[in-house]
Image (spheres, grey):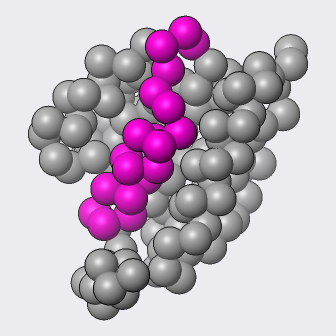
Amino acid sequence: MAVPRTALKKWEKVREFALGLPCAAEEFPWGDTVAKVNRKVFVFLGAPDGGHPLGVTVKLKDEAIHTHALTCPGAEPAGYGLGRAGWVRVPLEPEGAPAAALLCEWVEESYRVIAPRRLIAELDAR
């Protein structure tokens, strides 16, 4: 199953943005791509191999942002109990899926929830 080109381009922009955040690192647990800060995941990026629909999973503590993310086509609380902690999975492929710029805002929000204060201060100073 081929990944739609627009979804893949969006995924690449979000991945590049996430890895550009202070002290962000890419790892590949379970064969998926994740971005971590301080050894903690702040965004699950999945795998762009077409095995599963392309999407991102972010931790959104701000209630308004969390609610907005859940209104996206196909969005849902993340599995494995992560949804109860504010994690939301947002697919990139369906019609009406969020633009890369909005996804990057959500990735930054997730980063701010996970990252230590000194790195948030570094991000704010940019």
Question: Which residue occupies 30% across, 18% down?
Answer: 71
Q: How many labels does the image show?
A: 0
Q: Is residue 107 magenta?
A: yes
Question: Which residue occupies 58% across, 32% down?
Answer: 55
- Front residue of this view, candidates 31 and 1: 1
- Front residue of this view, candidates 92 and 26: 92
**Residue extent of the magenta highlight:** 94-113
- Front residue of this view, candidates 56 and 21: 21
The quadrant where residue 85 appears: top left
Image quarter of the C terminus: bottom left
The quadrant where residue 114 appears: bottom left
Classified by dominant secondary structure, the portion drawn in magenta counts as helix
Image quarter of the N terminus: top right
The quadrant where residue 15 appears: bottom right
Residue 17 image point, x, y percent? 57, 59
Q: Does the magenta stretch include residue 98?
A: yes
Q: Is residue 121 above or below residue 3?
A: below
Q: Is residue 49 left or right of residue 70?
A: right
Residue 108 image point, x, y percent? 38, 59
Question: Which residue occupies 53% across, 82% down?
Answer: 23
Residue farthest to the left? 63
Q: In this view, does 119 lie to the left or right of 65?
A: right
Q: Can residue 14 be seen in this view?
A: yes
Q: In this view, does 61 lie above or below 41?
A: above
Question: Which residue occupies 30% across, 24% down?
Answer: 70
Q: Is residue 38 left or right of residue 85?
A: right
Q: In this view, does 85 lie above or below 49?
A: below
